[in-house]
């Protein structure tokens, strides 16, 4: 039995660090584990330009505690009025790594998202040309489509077309939650990849709805049926370079989640590696954890792998019921549970 695992330092290819006091409260959890992270731009108002991304990057760096080295990789939020030339400039100046597509009203702070994806053709063409990645929240938002079907329908109606029309564009289908998402990424060419969160490897939709309504298990895309969770576990532990780590850590104040209209998002940053490695252990795939956490992402993004390492050991990691961040209580993923691996260095 393997009791200790040392791997190259991982990166988080999808995280919400927020801003202001919340940023100051959560940045260290990500920076402690990950060398780099793709930082989501869905602030209020969103980060839509190169200049805004540069300023946000400075605020993130100021929030990282001394002694931790962490590189935020910035994204720009696409809107109906995105300027393609600004994105190209952001890439050329080393500010932007990716741009993010949120269909309007798909998720937290996406009211400024794109209302008609077809209108983005000039933007996608400029991104393809500039080598700027496209990260996608892949859900349709029309009221006739069931919330549990929104990812599969997005793939069918929109993603397949984007990938076909812009074959040179690198596309990440973020936080995949379905077997359809897994199958699409697997079947697509080498320019298409998917990130997988810890929660979608651990829970199915029962966690949200059985024995009472449980707001801390609610995120978007919502957790699906068990068969989908199993497909995600298989994909994550397969050793494929097309699936990699993206926590989607999304802190919200406890009172905003425990509400008549609770916010979507799970704050998993504090024990992210412990949570993921538990899954790899259960699947007898510890030897493939480094590929998922530390190798596949940099290869897809065309970035060097990290030279430092981290070590995880078998042993109890007790997750607190709440964590104080930004002057408020936030409930972490696995609150009150004891995980069987801990990050030691
Ligand atoms: N995942 C979530 O449920 N919420 C995210 C937004 C997102 O990634 O869709 C957030 O910003 O809170
Ligand atoms: Zn999302
Ligand atoms: Zn997210």
Image (cartoon, rainbow, N blue to C red):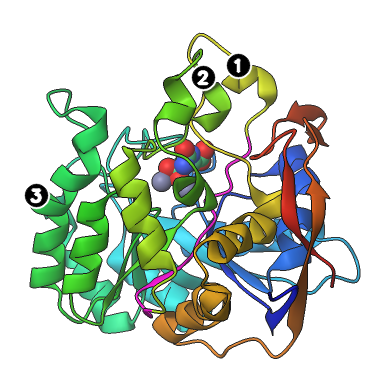
- Of 86 and 195, the residue lying toward us: 195
Residue range of the region highlighted in magenta in the rendering: 240-251
- Do the CB atoms of the residues marked 3 and 1 lie less than 8 Å apart? no
Q: Which residue lies furthest to the right in this view?
A: 66
Respond yes or no on whether mark 3 lies under 8 Å from ligand 2. Answer: no
Marking on residue 157: 3
User: Tag 2, which secondary structure?
Assistant: loop
Q: Which of marks 2 and 3 is nearer the N terminus?
A: 3
> Residue 299 colored magenta?
no
Q: Is residue 102 visible?
A: no
- Of 275 and 42, the residue lying toward us: 275
- Of 119 and 40, the residue lying toward us: 40
Give how far across and how far down residue 66 sits, in percent: 91, 66
Marking on residue 262: 2
User: Tag 1, which secondary structure?
Assistant: loop
Give how far across and how far down residue 197 sits, in percent: 49, 53
- Of 239 and 79, the residue lying toward us: 239
Disc 3 packing (10 Å; few <14; some 14–19; many ≥20): few
- Do the CB atoms of the residues marked 1 and 2 lie less than 8 Å apart? yes
Marking on residue 340: none
Q: Quadrant of the N terminus?
A: bottom right
Give the spatial CA distance, label 2 vs label 3.
29 Å
Q: Which residue lies furthest to the top in this view?
A: 260
Q: In which quarter of the image is the C terminus?
A: bottom right
User: Tag 3, which secondary structure?
Assistant: helix
Give how far across and how far down residue 137 sits, in percent: 34, 49
Give how far across and how far down residue 53 sits, in percent: 55, 60
Respond yes or no on whether mark 1 lies under 8 Å from ligand 1. Answer: no
Residue at image coords 38%, 69%: 87
Q: Which residue lies furthest to the front in this view?
A: 1
Residue at image mark 1: 258
């Amino acid at each position: 039995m393997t009791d200790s695992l040392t791997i190259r330092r991982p990166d988080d290819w999808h995280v919400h660090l927020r801003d202001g006091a919340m940023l100051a409260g959560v940045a260290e959890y990500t920076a402690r584990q990950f060398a780099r992270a793709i930082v989501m731009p869905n602030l209020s108002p969103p980060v839509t330009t190169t200049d805004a991304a540069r300023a946000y990057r400075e605020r993130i760096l100021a929030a990282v505690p001394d002694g931790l080295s962490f590189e935020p990789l910035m994204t720009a939020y696409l809107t109906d009025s995105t300027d393609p030339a600004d994105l190209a400039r952001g890439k050329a100046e080393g500010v932007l790594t990716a741009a993010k597509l949120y269909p309007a009203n798909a998720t937290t702070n996406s009211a400024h998202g794109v209302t008609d994806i077809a209108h983005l053709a000039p933007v996608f063409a400029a991104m393809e040309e500039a080598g700027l990645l496209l990260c996608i929240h892949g859900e349709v938002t029309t009221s006739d489509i069931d919330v549990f079907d929104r990812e599969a329908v997005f793939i069918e109606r929109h993603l397949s077309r984007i990938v076909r029309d812009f074959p040179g564009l690198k596309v990440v289908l973020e936080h995949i939650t379905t077997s359809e998402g897994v199958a699409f990424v697997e079947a697509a060419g080498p320019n298409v990849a998917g990130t997988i969160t810890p929660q979608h490897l651990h829970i199915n939709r029962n966690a949200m709805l059985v024995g009472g309504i449980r707001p801390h298990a609610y995120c978007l895309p919502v957790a699906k049926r068990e068969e989908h969770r199993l497909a995600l576990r298989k994909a994550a532990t397969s050793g494929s370079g097309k699936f990699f780590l993206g926590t989607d850590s999304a802190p919200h104040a406890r009172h905003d989640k425990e509400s008549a209209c609770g916010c979507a998002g799970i704050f998993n940053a504090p024990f992210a590696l412990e949570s993921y490695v538990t899954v790899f252990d259960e699947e007898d795939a510890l030897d493939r954890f480094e590929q998922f956490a530390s190798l596949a992402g940099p290869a897809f993004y065309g970035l060097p792998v990290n030279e430092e390492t981290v070590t995880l050991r078998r042993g109890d990691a007790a997750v607190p019921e709440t964590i104080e961040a930004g002057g408020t209580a936030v409930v972490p993923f696995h609150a009150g549970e004891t995980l069987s691996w801990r990050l030691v260095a």
